[in-house]
Image (tube, coloured by chain):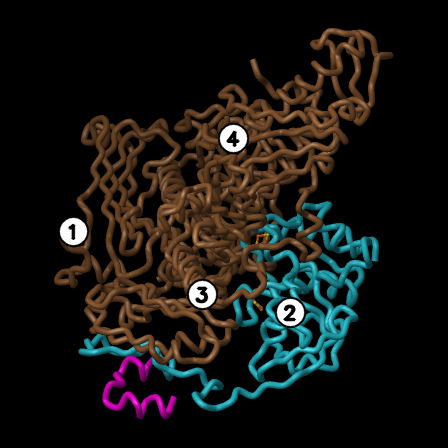
Chain colours: A brown, B cyan
């Protein structure tokens, strides 16, 4: 049975190893899609609608076409079709410089017949609202109702009840490298695209289909990628159109979205509003849960969220609807549906616990069936100093008040089939590992090197890893769902093991030992029963001559495991005069399974916590109901965490088993709930709407006084 | 914009006027016909030659001759510039992320001071010693900040990293032993979406010991 071996046997796996791309990234050498400069390259731009809802009456490209330096102008929206959100694509240009491209799109004349729009959920759900989707009634999807147990019977057993409404607004991904591509046709039949994507093979297959090409004549390259968080799958409109511009002009074209377009059309996390009534028994068991909720994913659907979450409620009814608005579509965003669901559930848990007169941690222990999280509660509580927590929320006269809170999360991340890889040993002793996954900042490139180096007794820097290129024809899935490591690692491990086996078979006769007795470590192959019999790695591989060893691998169920639990504790300080919340410390205890690279795993946990902190305190997309436009489609008014917001973060890699699991998403889940509960514990008023901004705190404090 | 409006005559709608003045207080009335995208680039009037000049820049100790327009930013020259002998400048370490002086992704040094290259006109960069992230290392010897960033994994996707590296180097050259608070202030002009901040703080502390 395949295994990763004991921790004590691992020289590299599970250690803190700096990533291989570090040097290129700190010296500016790393080339992202945005940095690709091809000979003769043109610059593409897209004209987008500023209007949220309209009929397209006319598009005139002639002035743009006549501008010197413009090489192609294409119309994207057809006359007679509808514009359904701000940012929708109207036309695209390719020009000699980006400035000329910018000038050219301003010369495109567009005649639109404006239609009434709705861009807020309130407007969309209001009586008499204009209908914006033909397939729904009243801008709402059919309710999705789920029932389990006996709700009325549950409430009859409840000793306490809470009824409350929790809300989380739309967030945007804010990838620092915007979506975009560089497209270049070698000839009519061969296309190369540098793509800022989480899935090179997905982009390849889409483009091959769009241009009617055999898949192996489209090559997609993503050497480095500047953030995706779930929003970068498939080439998108911009990807297909840049390939078209390149084909028309016969020159390479680069087209990256502007920062504004990135906010408008490149995805977002849907909003959530849930009205909950829930009850618990006198001895602290959740017994009944009744939730009616809605959210918007823009003009599309997909506004799902988890409710109830993590904790078990035997009797429940949930009803959800999607609300359509004239705004760009949602896309998966780091743990879709989870952080907002966790915020509502963890807030609810604390409200119930307070009514029961119970410590919220104790209340969770009673209702949480996860043994892993039970252990995490103990560890996290110790680490944050839970005993120091305010026993009376909001007590005391101090202007700055401190409080603590806890939140929980769960995720899958067990990976799956669909990855092919090759590990090659060359006669000069060098080693290559190739697979079609992509490194989106998570460090999979380094993880691959660690696994191969561990197997061969080499250093990670000895391994040349090729990822992010469909050229070698070794497919792998998109990097989403925290699935990459658990999908790729087993294949790499078995490929390396197969290559090692082949090498041992070649060398065993010389060492006069059975193949099974051979081991490798420290650049030397030796016989385990007689350590005097050794051969240096390079001497062994030198005998391969032209006959390098190259082996594929298999995904192995036994090497990975899905299902992770996490819990976080937050300590905050709230200034009751300014309403400012300062997070002092977050303890994140994250179930990880086997962390191939402990350092990169800690980075992931830090990153998740910080994104969760942004959702808790800062991030919100603002739509202007009157004009139908987004008011903060930039990095000035759309706030993401900066240096001042960063608390002390204690990332605890909670590795209880030796199987690989992904943790890209789970660490962002418990943070907003933990912070919201800490704020309540500090000031004794509850903010049920994210983000928890100073205005909400001051208003709530004033209402409490009144 | 003026002659464009004349050409379009009555076709100019309330909405395009609003777009021009950038206000958001339009009433929700429905204009029968709406025109968008009709403004002209302020400095690219049809028929007018766009003012351009050949200038010399000193980047990472090397002279570059480039032709620029008045509106060309230093960042555009670094990333997309072509010198007068036809070679790409190709210094793509500095990134355009926000395009408005908010994120620090484009940070370079001008005479040792950190500046946002997206906010500096190329013409204003003449007579200054520009140092980009590509110019920080001494041959194969990395700057202590660069070493420390690698060691502490102060980077994930790495897109913000060049900006943070340059800002950190500039901070340490001003203040060789910054406190955590001073590091936060010194790097407050830079944004990272992956959330590498804690390890960046560690890296700057480590680098400060070697300065
Ligand atoms: S791109 Fe220059 S500060 Fe953001
Ligand atoms: S490392 Fe990705 S944005 Fe900073």
Q: Is residue B137 left or right of residue A74?
A: right
Q: Which residue range is magenta in the image?
A: B1-19
Q: Which residue is mark 2?
A: B78
Give the camera-side residue of A93 and B105. A93
Closer to the chain start, of discs 1 and 3, is 1
Q: Is residue A623 left or right of residue A2?
A: left
Q: CA distance from mark 2 to mark 3?
A: 25 Å
Q: CA distance from mark 4 to mark 2?
A: 39 Å
Residue A176 in percent (x, y) is at 53, 58
Residue A49, quarter of the rendered image: bottom left
Q: Are marks 2 and 3 on the same chain?
A: no
Q: Which mark is residue A135?
A: 1
Give the chain letter at badge 1: A
Q: Are marks 1 and 3 on the same chain?
A: yes
Give the camera-side residue of A93 and A453. A93
- Could you tell me which residue is drawn at 27 percent across and 56 percent down? A299
Residue A517 in percent (x, y) is at 73, 9
Q: Are marks 2 and 3 in contact (CB under 8 Å)?
A: no
Callout in the foreground (3, 4): 3
Q: Which residue is mark 4?
A: A420
Residue A681 visible in rendering: no
Secondary-structure class at tag 4: loop
Callout in the foreground (2, 1): 2
- Could you tell me which residue is drawn at 59 percent across and 69 percent down? B80
Q: Are marks 2 and 1 in contact (CB under 8 Å)?
A: no
């Amino acid at each position: 049975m395949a295994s990763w071996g004991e921790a004590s046997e691992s020289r590299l796996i599970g250690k803190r190893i700096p990533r291989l791309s570090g040097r290129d990234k700190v010296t500016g050498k790393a080339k992202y899609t945005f940095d690709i400069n091809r000979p003769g390259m043109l610059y593409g731009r897209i004209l987008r609608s500023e209007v949220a809802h309209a009929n397209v009456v006319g598009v005139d490209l002639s002035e743009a076409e006549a501008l010197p330096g413009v090489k192609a102008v294409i119309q994207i929206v057809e006359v007679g079709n509808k514009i359904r959100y701000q940012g929708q694509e109207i036309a695209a240009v390719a020009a000699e410089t980006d400035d000329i491209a910018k000038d050219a799109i301003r010369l495109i004349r567009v005649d639109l017949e404006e239609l009434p729009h709705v861009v807020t959920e309130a407007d969309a759900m209001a009586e008499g609202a204009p209908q914006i989707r033909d397939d729904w009634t009243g801008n709402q999807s059919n309710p999705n109702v789920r029932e389990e147990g006996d709700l009325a019977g549950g409430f009859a057993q409840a000793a306490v009840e809470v009824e409350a409404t929790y809300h989380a607004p739309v967030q945007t991904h804010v990838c620092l490298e915007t979506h975009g591509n560089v497209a270049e046709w070698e000839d009519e039949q061969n296309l190369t695209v540098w793509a800022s994507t989480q899935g090179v093979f997905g982009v390849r297959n889409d483009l091959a289909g769009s241009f009617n090409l055999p898949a192996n004549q489209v090559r997609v390259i993503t050497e480095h990628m500047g953030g995706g968080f779930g929003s970068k799958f498939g080439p998108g409109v911009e990807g297909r159109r840049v390939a078209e511009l390149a084909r028309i002009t016969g020159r390479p074209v680069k087209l990256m979205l502007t920062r504004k377009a990135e906010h408008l059309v490149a995805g977002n996390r849907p909003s959530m509003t849930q009205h909950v009534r829930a009850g618990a028994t006198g001895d602290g068991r959740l017994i009944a849960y009744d939730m009616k909720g809605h959210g918007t994913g823009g003009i599309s659907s997909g506004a799902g969220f988890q409710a109830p979450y993590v904790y078990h409620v035997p009797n429940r009814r949930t009803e959800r609807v999607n609300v359509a608005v004239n705004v760009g579509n949602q896309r998966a965003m780091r743990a879709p549906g989870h952080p907002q669901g966790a915020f509502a559930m963890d807030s609810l848990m604390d409200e119930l616990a307070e009514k029961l007169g119970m410590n919220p941690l104790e209340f969770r222990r009673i209702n949480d069936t996860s043994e892993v999280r039970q252990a995490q509660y103990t560890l996290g509580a110790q680490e944050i100093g839970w005993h120091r927590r305010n026993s009376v929320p909001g007590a005391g006269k101090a202007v700055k008040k401190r409080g603590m809170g806890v939140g929980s999360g769960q995720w899958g991340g067990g990976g799956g089939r669909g990855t092919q890889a090759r590990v090659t040993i060359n006669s000069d002793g060098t080693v290559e590992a190739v697979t079609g996954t992509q490194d989106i900042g998570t460090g999979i490139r380094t993880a691959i090197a660690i696994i191969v180096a561990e197997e061969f007794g080499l250093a990670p820097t000895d391994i040349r890893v090729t990822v992010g290129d469909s050229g070698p024809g070794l497919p792998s899935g998109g990097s989403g769902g925290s699935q990459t490591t658990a999908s790729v690692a087993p294949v790499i491990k078995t490929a390396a093991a197969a290559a090692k086996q082949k090498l041992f078979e070649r060398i065993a006769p010389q060492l006069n030992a059975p193949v099974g007795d051979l081991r490798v470590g420290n650049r030397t192959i030796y016989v385990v029963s007689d350590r005097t019999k050794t051969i240096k790695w390079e001497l062994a591989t030198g005998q391969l001559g032209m006959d390098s060893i190259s082996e594929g691998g298999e995904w192995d169920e036994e090497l990975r495991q899905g299902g992770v639990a996490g819990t976080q504790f937050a300590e905050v300080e709230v200034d009751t005069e300014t309403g400012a919340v300062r997070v002092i410390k977050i303890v994140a205890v994250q179930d990880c399974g086997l962390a191939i690279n402990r350092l990169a795993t800690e980075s992931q946990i830090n990153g998740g916590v910080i994104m969760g902190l942004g959702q808790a305190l800062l991030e919100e997309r603002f739509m202007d109901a009157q004009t139908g436009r987004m008011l903060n489609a930039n990095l000035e008014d759309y706030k993401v965490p900066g240096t001042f917001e960063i608390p002390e973060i204690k990332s605890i890699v909670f590795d209880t088993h030796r199987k690989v699991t992904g943790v890209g998403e789970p660490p962002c889940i418990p943070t907003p709930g933990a912070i919201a509960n800490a704020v309540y514990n500090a000031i004794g008023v509850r903010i049920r709407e994210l983000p928890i901004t100073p205005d909400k705190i001051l208003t709530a404090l004033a209402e409490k006084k009144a | 914009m003026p002659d464009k409006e004349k050409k379009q005559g009555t076709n100019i709608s309330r909405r395009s006027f609003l777009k021009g003045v950038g206000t958001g207080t339009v009433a929700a009335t429905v204009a029968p016909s709406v025109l968008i995208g009709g403004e002209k680039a302020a400095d690219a009037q049809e028929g007018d030659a766009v003012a351009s000049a050949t200038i010399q820049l000193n980047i990472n100790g090397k002279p570059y001759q480039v032709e620029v327009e008045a509106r060309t930013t230093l960042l555009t020259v670094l990333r997309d510039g072509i010198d007068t002998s036809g070679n790409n400048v190709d210094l793509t370490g500095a990134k355009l992320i926000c395009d408005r002086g908010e994120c620090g992704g484009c940070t370079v040094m001008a005479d040792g001071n950190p500046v946002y290259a997206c906010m500096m006109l190329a013409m204003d960069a003449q007579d200054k010693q520009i140092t980009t992230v590509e110019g920080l290392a001494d041959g194969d010897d990395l700057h202590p900040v660069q070493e420390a960033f690698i060691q502490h994994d102060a980077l994930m996707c790495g897109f913000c990293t060049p900006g943070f590296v340059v800002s950190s180097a500039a901070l340490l050259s001003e203040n060789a032993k910054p406190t955590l608070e001073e590091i936060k202030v010194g790097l407050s002009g830079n944004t990272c979406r992956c959330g590498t901040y804690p390890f960046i703080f560690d890296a700057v502390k480590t680098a400060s010991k070697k300065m």
